[in-house]
Image (cartoon, rainbow, N blue to C red):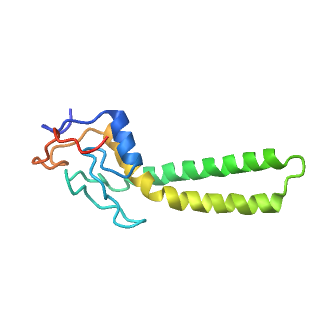
């Protein structure tokens, strides 16, 4: 169903836009106000990036999965490269550094990516996108 007059982009396009920090609906950039803050709405199509209370719990979960995945890869590669005498202390320090870096680096991406995933799962409701938004003008991807 969805909001009348809004042509939804393909799922792949929405994911690419979310992963690159763009609006999943129209592709507008500059959704992040700072590294830790995302705009409440897209400036171009007025799509709300937090569609309901607790919306970004999914983004936190996504960030956690990516961070833990990078930690696991770091441990596995570090152990494989240094076996049989694995330097546990050095590997631990490197692993903690990778985990901290990835959680901070991926944070803004996780928010826009989660908005894209949410837009794919939950139809747009009337009023969520500005009726003056022209979906025929595609600015990205």
Does 119 sit left or right of 82 as displayed? left
Residue 138 percent across, percent down from the top left: 22, 41
Furthest toward the left, the residue is: 132
Q: Is residue 102 visible?
A: yes
Name the residue rendered at 58%, 53% in the picture.
67
Q: Residue furthest right?
A: 85
Residue displayed at 34% across by 40% down: 14
Which part of the image, by quadrant, shows the N terminus?
Answer: top left
Q: Is residue 141 above or below residue 96?
A: above
Quadrant in which the C terminus appears: top left
Q: How many marks?
A: 0
Q: Is residue 131 left or right of residue 36?
A: left
Q: Indicate the position of residue 126 as horizontal and vertical percent values.
A: 15, 44
How far across and how far down the image is residue 120, in percent? Answer: 33, 38
Name the spot of residue 111 as percent of width and height, x first: 40, 54
Q: Please, is residue 32 above or below residue 64 in the view?
A: below
* Residue at 86%, 46% in the rendered image: 83
- Identify the residue shown where x is 80% and y is 47%: 81
Residue 57 visible from this viewpoint: no
Side of 67 where 131 appears, left or right: left
Q: Is residue 25 left or right of residue 79?
A: left
């Amino acid at each position: 169903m969805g909001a009348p007059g809004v042509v939804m982009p393909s799922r792949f396009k929405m994911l690419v836009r979310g992963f690159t920090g763009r609006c999943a609906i129209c592709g507008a950039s500059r959704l992040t106000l700072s590294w830790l803050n995302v705009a409440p709405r897209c400036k171009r199509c007025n799509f709300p990036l937090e569609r309901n209370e607790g919306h970004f719990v999914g983004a936190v979960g996504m960030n956690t999965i990516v961070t833990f995945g990078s930690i696991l890869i770091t441990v596995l590669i570090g152990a494989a490269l240094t076996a049989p005498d694995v330097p546990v202390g050095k590997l631990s320090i490197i692993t903690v550094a990778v985990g901290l870096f990835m959680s901070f680096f991926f944070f803004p991406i996780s928010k826009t990516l989660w908005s894209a995933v949410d837009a794919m799962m939950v139809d747009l409701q009337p009023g969520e996108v500005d009726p003056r938004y022209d979906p025929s003008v595609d600015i990205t991807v």
